[in-house]
Image (spheres, rainbow, N blue to C red):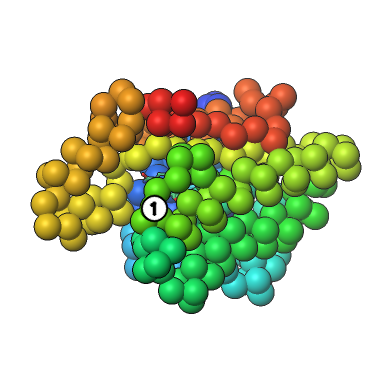
Amino acid sequence: MTKMQDTGRVAGKIILLTGGAMGLGEAAAKRLISEGARLIITDHNAEAGQKTALALGDNAEFLEQDVSDPDRWIEIIAEVEEKYGRLDVLINNAAVTVYGSIADVSYEDFKRCFTVDVDSIFLGCKAALPLMGKTGGSIINFSSAAAMNATADLAAYCSAKAAIPMLTKSIALYCAREKNGVRVNAVLPGTILTPNVQSVANASPDPDALLEQFAMAQPVGHMGEPDDIAHLVVYLASDESKFATGAGFAVDGGLSI
Ligand SMILES: NC(=O)c1ccc[n+]([C@@H]2O[C@H](COP(=O)([O-])OP(=O)(O)OC[C@H]3O[C@@H](n4cnc5c(N)ncnc54)[C@H](O)[C@@H]3O)[C@@H](O)[C@H]2O)c1
């Protein structure tokens, strides 16, 4: 391990980031590393996760994790505690997008969406809080603009993402009551051009038309870039946001207005 940077907005912070192999997680990981963090990224895609961690350099490591597995959460937090003695920031980013209207989506897929997107946050916070509460810290939960703007063909995803800001508020109030120094906030991105969004477009009959449709959904007329969200994550991970808790931060080109 190289010497930790002693400058930067999150210098020396121990940060656990789920779903860090690609997309918004990877973009946030890059920003956090450049601001001096020590990062543990997890993902169920071990090959991509290892590759990303390697590219991030000596201050990043990878652990394989299915975020919907309760036992794995316990193991990972125990590993972090043994190695670092504390956890400063938990970023619950991993999720799946399940497509389909109420007529099309199966009950199995509906439940899978909630298990990966919502249960994972419950499990992660429950497992991490006893450790984080010893020293204080910041929890960042990824929701979506879809939490506020319903789409007929995203019945499972919209409702799962809507549960996250409320779960975030409840955990934030618990932490405030406990005076454990842990802040808990939600991030609500609009449509951001990630590999996931690009692959959805590629799978459609007219990818360019769908990308244009995604862009025009935002009142500003374009999609966001992964760094638009990564900068917010750095702010929430840093002590700059020390008075923010229980909030939902929309970065969505006006989609939720
Ligand atoms: N990209 C967007 O436009 C957008 C918009 C709003 C919200 N979001 C949210 O932001 C977050 C990141 O989005 P993204 O576009 O980068 O998604 P993505 O699908 O590209 O990345 C998600 C990561 O999570 C991992 N993952 C999926 N299921 C997992 C599981 N069970 N266990 C562990 N890892 C798992 C994937 O392998 C992937 O690396 C998600 O919570 C998403 O819902 C994204």
The residue located at (67%, 45%) in the rendering is: 166
**133 sits left or right of 113 in the view:** right
Say which amino acid is labelled 1: Ala
Q: Along the line of sight, which residue is nearer the eye, 96 or 243?
A: 96
Answer above or below: position of 128 versus 210.
below
**85 sits left or right of 250 in the view:** right
Considering the numbered disc 1 on the image, is that residue within a helix, a strand or a loop?
loop
Determine which quarter of the picture holds residue 6. Answer: top right
> Which residue in the protein does label 1 denote?
152
Determine which quarter of the picture holds residue 249. Answer: top right
Percent coordinates x, y for residue 210 in the rendering: 19, 46
Percent coordinates x, y for residue 179 in the rendering: 87, 37
Q: Is mark 1 within 8 Å of ligand 1?
A: no
Q: Along the line of sight, which residue is nearer the eye, 55 or 157?
A: 157
Question: Circle 1: is it few (<14), some (14-19), or many (20+) Cα within 10 Å?
Answer: few
Percent coordinates x, y for residue 4 in the rendering: 55, 39
